[in-house]
Image (cartoon, helix red, strand yellow):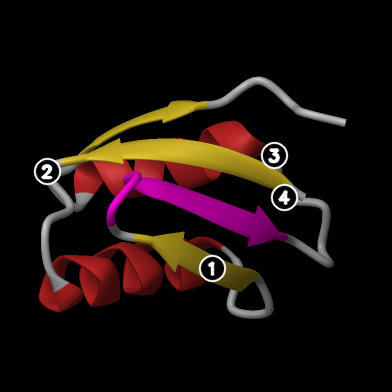
Amino acid sequence: MFEIKVTRMNCGGCAKSVTRAIHGVDAGATVAIDLPTGTVAITSPAGTPAGRFVDAVRTAGYGANTLPFAA
């Protein structure tokens, strides 16, 4: 699991767009969005690299960066 920080994700519609972008990369990914903090936790059973999800979210029109792993 890893987390990405998403900017300009302000509402439920934005969250759905981000989720669609992530599922476009890995349909089996589990996505947990925290709107107040702008973070998205992703678990990819396929082992898809975080960078591919970040690129997809950016292509969807949002800012996105990976967050450091917190053990």
Closer to the chain start, of discs 2 and 4, is 2
Q: Quadrant of the C terminus?
A: top right
Kindly check if marks 4 and 3 are in contact, taking CB atoms under 8 A apart as contact.
yes
Q: Nearer the viewer, mark 1 or mark 4?
A: 1
Residue drawn at x 73%, y 61% is: 43
Which is more N-terminal, label 2 or label 1?
Answer: 2
Q: Is residue 60 magenta?
A: no
- Give the residue pinned by disc 3: 49
Instruction: Compute the Cα span from label 2 to label 3.
Output: 23 Å
Asked if the magenta segment contains residue 40, the reply would be: yes
Q: Position of residue 42 (x, y in %)?
A: 63, 57
Residue type, mark 1 in image:
Ala
Q: Is residue 18 left or right of residue 61?
A: right
Which residue, given by chain and number where applicable, does mark 4 sit on? Answer: 48
The kind of residue on which mark 2 rests is Arg
For label 3, the SS is loop
Give the residues drawn in magenta, as a range: 36-43
Q: Which residue is mark 1?
A: 32
Q: Mark 2 = which residue?
A: 8
Q: Name which of mark 1 and mark 3 comes first in the sequence.
A: 1
